[in-house]
């Protein structure tokens, strides 16, 4: 099932400014924070010693902005990511089924260290990931991957799956981007970046479910105005 939604609803589902969940996701791991802090220190040094021709007031403002880079950068990056979704002209509410569930081990990074013999050793960091294949009767299929968690054990093939899809075509015939997947039976979200305002998406899902249950006055299909 694929139901077109309006641009107004799309903007409600995908916020302009980064949410708390998006900020935490982009915040990253300790090494990511360390890189931002180092960049901020270098930037402050450049402002302090390399831009002495500027007035004291402007230099102070630039120094504060540079010094707080490690703090505000994740919010800017998340907002730019949101903007990529919001710029699509057409969007739709998609509902299908879980086709397959399987677990893989994925390489998430490498570390270089030296052993007791002075030899360089490369350590591969891997984590177990849940792979969720979803699809519908039209033949559309896609796979969503996320870090495996204990609560994922309840997921089974055949579970209802819902998500936001984005396209540049008004008939949504070519899907270019998707959101995280929502499994209403288990109230689970599967994906990486939390693009959606999830309470708004759940409300939309419930509204559409009630509309499908109510008797239709006309057999002609109508475009959703949600």
Image: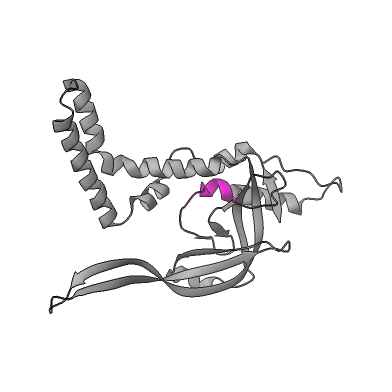
Q: Position of residue 53 (x, y in %)?
A: 17, 22
Residue 135 sits above or below residue 77 on the image:
below
* Residue under the image location 55 percent in, 70 percent down: 155
Residue situated in front as seen by the camera: 117 or 70: 117
Q: Which quarter of the picture shows residue 48?
A: top left
Instruction: Locate the C terminus and report the quarter of the image it occupies.
Output: top right
Q: Position of residue 95 (x, y in %)?
A: 66, 58
Query: Which segment is the magenta one?
Result: 193-202
Q: Which quarter of the picture shows residue 56?
A: top left
Q: Is residue 98 visible?
A: yes
Instruction: Locate the N terminus and report the quarter of the image it occupies.
Output: bottom right
Residue 29 on the magenta segment? no
Residue 194 on the magenta segment? yes
Tell me which colouring the rendered structure shows. one colour
Residue 141 sits above or below residue 87 on the image:
below
Residue 93 sits above or below residue 144 on the image:
above
Q: Which quarter of the picture shows residue 134?
A: bottom right
Q: Position of residue 204 (x, y in %)?
A: 62, 47
Q: Is residue 14 visible?
A: no
Is 138 placed left or right of 123 in the picture? right
* Residue under the image location 63 percent in, 40 percent down: 89
Q: Position of residue 126 (x, y in %)?
A: 36, 71
Is 10 placed left or right of 125 in the picture? right
Give the number of callouts: 0
Residue situated in front as seen by the camera: 160 or 83: 83
Is 81 placed left or right of 161 in the picture? left
């Amino acid at each position: 099932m694929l139901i077109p939604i309006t641009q107004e609803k799309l903007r409600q589902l995908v916020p302009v400014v980064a949410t708390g969940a998006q900020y935490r996701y982009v915040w990253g791991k300790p090494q990511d924070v360390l890189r931002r802090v180092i960049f901020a220190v270098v930037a402050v040094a450049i402002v302090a010693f390399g831009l002495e021709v500027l007035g004291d007031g402007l230099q102070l403002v630039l120094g504060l902005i540079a010094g707080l880079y490690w703090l505000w950068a994740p919010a800017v990056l998340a907002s730019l990511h949101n903007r990529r979704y919001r710029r699509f002209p057409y969007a739709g509410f998609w509902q299908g089924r879980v086709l397959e569930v399987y677990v893989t081990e994925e390489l998430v990074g490498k570390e270089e260290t030296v052993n007791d013999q002075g030899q360089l050793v490369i350590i591969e960091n891997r984590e177990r990931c849940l792979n969720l294949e979803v699809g519908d009767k039209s033949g559309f299929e896609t796979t969503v991957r996320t870090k495996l968690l204990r609560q994922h054990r309840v997921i089974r093939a055949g579970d209802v799956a819902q998500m936001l899809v984005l396209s540049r075509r008004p008939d949504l015939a070519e899907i270019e981007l998707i959101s995280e997947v929502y499994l209403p039976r288990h109230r689970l979200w599967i994906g990486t970046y939390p693009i959606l305002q999830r309470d708004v998406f759940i409300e939309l899902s419930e509204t559409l479910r009630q509309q499908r249950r109510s008797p239709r006055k006309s057999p002609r299909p109508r475009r959703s105005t949600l």
